[in-house]
């Protein structure tokens, strides 16, 4: 029966970008058009206000100097024609404090004064008292007779009414509107690019987590069609790389496994020979070769990233067993293994075999860096917060500050090490401790030597050994 696969959810980045640009352009057009309309209306009104006040300059001067009596004299001919509704479009009316008309230009009786519904004088208006299209403004003037209101208006229905100064006055506001629109479009484009590039940033974060607890491959869901081939190519390259690494690990493990038995037999045969310098050198070489084979097997096991078995083990017993395993080798090289541990068990949840491998690697590292005759200390205990702590201390030269960053890196070896190896021991220690939810660090003892410290989660006090 064929298995129905779920189709991939993809989209075109170009089409999406074009659609968002269209939306942004339309929104910008609507908002910009509304702002532009309001700006032009404001500019036209301000220019009209300035124009009508300037046209009534002669009337204002007479009121300021002579009062209402000054309007009894005829205005200059050009101004009089302008303020006559029969020949011009301008009109004025002079009002007292209560809004009563004191004087007006010919023909302005039906239009001015322009009063509000409550009887107060309108300061700016675009409609006459009779409902006609008249734009006007009211100005308070101090006269010899007291303050009066001068209302000046223009009939906007006249075909020859032209606001010549509007284009020049509107230039800067228009530039401001267009500049603001350009900035808005730029910011919108930047925001769209950041929004549309989210799948790439997500893929970058996933790539950073590969091998560090994240998914083994990049997710292809919701990936743009233009980027999908690149993501699939990267996943394919990772598949090929994993296949190659798996073959290499399998080959190393198989070779190491095949060499372990012959080396053990060879070491046993050497023990039967007469002891001498040649036999001792051969025995040391075979032991070092056997250690390399053991490191290969441990590296292959640690590289598989298999989950830990969920079991419970006694950390004190594990440490004691690890010390007994290395006791003969340490004594042969002139070292004494000193163990400090409580009598009662410290129960830890995890995989005892993996943690034992980590302890053995720490002891082997201490043997490699300790001068002959110096002791090696293994301390096991609990912390104030209830967690378990393990310390392995040597009496060598300590760890240089420049080497701390590389100490737990695979295949890295300090230049002062006296043993040959693959540089995998401390890297395996870190992987095992992190898998148990703990931490590992190193510091130099003031008395000399390096101290490696393992901190593990709180032991299970309620567990009873079987």
Image (cartoon, grey):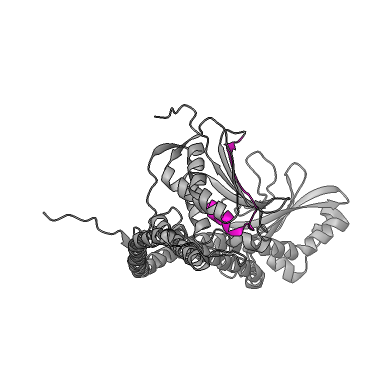
Toward which corner of the image does residue 134 lie, by quadrant?
bottom right
Quadrant (top left/top right/bottom left/bottom right) for the N terminus:
bottom left
Magenta residue check for 353: no
The residue most toward the front is 274
Q: Residue at x 58, y 66 (%)?
A: 183
Q: Residue at x 85, y 54 (%)?
A: 67
Answer whether residue 214 is visible to the viewer in this image.
yes
Q: Residue at x 50, y 57 (%)?
A: 425
Residue 318, given in percent of the width and then of the height, sits at 48, 41
The one of 170 and 186 positioned closer to us in this rendering: 186
Residue 288, given in percent of the width and then of the height, sits at 48, 63
Vertical side of 257 occupied by 362: above or below: above
The one of 259 and 151 positioned closer to us in this rendering: 259
The one of 256 and 216 positioned closer to us in this rendering: 256
The residue most toward the left is 1
Quadrant (top left/top right/bottom left/bottom right) for the C terminus:
top left
Q: How many marks?
A: 0
Answer whether residue 110 is visible to the viewer in this image.
no
Vertical side of 70 occupied by 356: above or below: above
User: Quick check: 2 left or right of 48?
Assistant: left
Vertical side of 32 occupied by 336: above or below: above
Residue 103, given in percent of the width and then of the height, sits at 75, 52
Residue 69, given in percent of the width and then of the height, sits at 84, 55
Which segment did they paint magenta?
362-383
The one of 45 and 24 positioned closer to us in this rendering: 24
């Amino acid at each position: 029966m064929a298995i129905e696969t779920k189709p991939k959810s993809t989209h075109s980045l170009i089409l999406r970008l074009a659609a968002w640009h269209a939306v942004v352009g339309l929104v910008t057009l609507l908002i910009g058009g509304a702002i532009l309309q309001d700006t032009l209306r404001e500019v036209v009104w301000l220019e009209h206000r300035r124009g009508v006040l300037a046209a009534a300059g002669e009337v204002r001067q007479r009121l300021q100097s002579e009062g209402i009596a000054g309007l009894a004299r005829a205005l200059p001919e050009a101004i009089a024609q302008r303020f006559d509704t029969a020949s011009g479009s301008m009109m004025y009316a002079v009002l007292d404090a209560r809004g009563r008309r004191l004087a007006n230009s010919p023909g302005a009786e039906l239009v001015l004064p322009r009063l509000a519904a409550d009887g107060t004088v309108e300061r700016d208006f675009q409609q006459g008292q009779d409902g006609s299209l008249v734009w006007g403004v009211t100005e308070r003037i101090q006269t010899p007779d007291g303050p009066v209101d001068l209302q000046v208006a223009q009939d906007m229905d006249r075909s020859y009414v032209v606001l010549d100064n509007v284009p020049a006055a509107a230039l800067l506001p228009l530039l401001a509107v267009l500049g603001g629109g350009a900035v808005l479009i730029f910011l919108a484009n930047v925001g769209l690019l950041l929004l549309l590039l989210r799948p790439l940033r997500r893929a970058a974060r996933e790539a950073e987590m590969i091998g560090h607890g994240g998914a083994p491959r990049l997710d292809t869901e919701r990936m743009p069609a233009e980027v999908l081939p690149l993501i699939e190519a990267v996943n394919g390259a990772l598949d090929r790389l994993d296949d190659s690494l798996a073959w290499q690990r399998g080959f190393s493990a198989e070779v190491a496994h095949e060499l372990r038995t012959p080396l053990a037999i060879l070491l046993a045969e050497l023990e039967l020979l007469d002891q001498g310098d040649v036999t001792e050198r051969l025995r040391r070489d075979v032991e070092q070769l056997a250690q390399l084979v053991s490191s290969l097997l441990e590296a292959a096991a640690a590289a598989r990233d298999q989950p830990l078995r969920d079991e419970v083990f006694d950390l004190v017993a594990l440490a004691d067993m690890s010390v007994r395993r290395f006791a003969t080798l340490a004594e042969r090289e002139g070292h004494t293994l000193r163990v400090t541990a409580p009598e009662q068990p410290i129960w830890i949840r995890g995989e005892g075999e993996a943690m034992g491998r980590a302890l053995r690697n720490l002891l082997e590292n201490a043997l490699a860096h300790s001068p002959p005759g110096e002791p090696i200390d293994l301390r096991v205990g609990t912390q104030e917060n209830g967690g378990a702590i393990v310390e392995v201390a040597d009496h060598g030269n300590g760890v240089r500050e420049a080497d701390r960053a590389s100490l737990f890196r695979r295949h890295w070896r300090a230049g002062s090490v006296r043993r040959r190896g693959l540089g995998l021991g401390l890297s395996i220690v870190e992987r095992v401790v992190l898998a148990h939810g703990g931490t590992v660090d190193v510091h130099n003892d003031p008395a000399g030597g390096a101290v490696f410290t393992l901190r593990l989660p709180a032991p299970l006090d309620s567990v009873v050994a079987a």
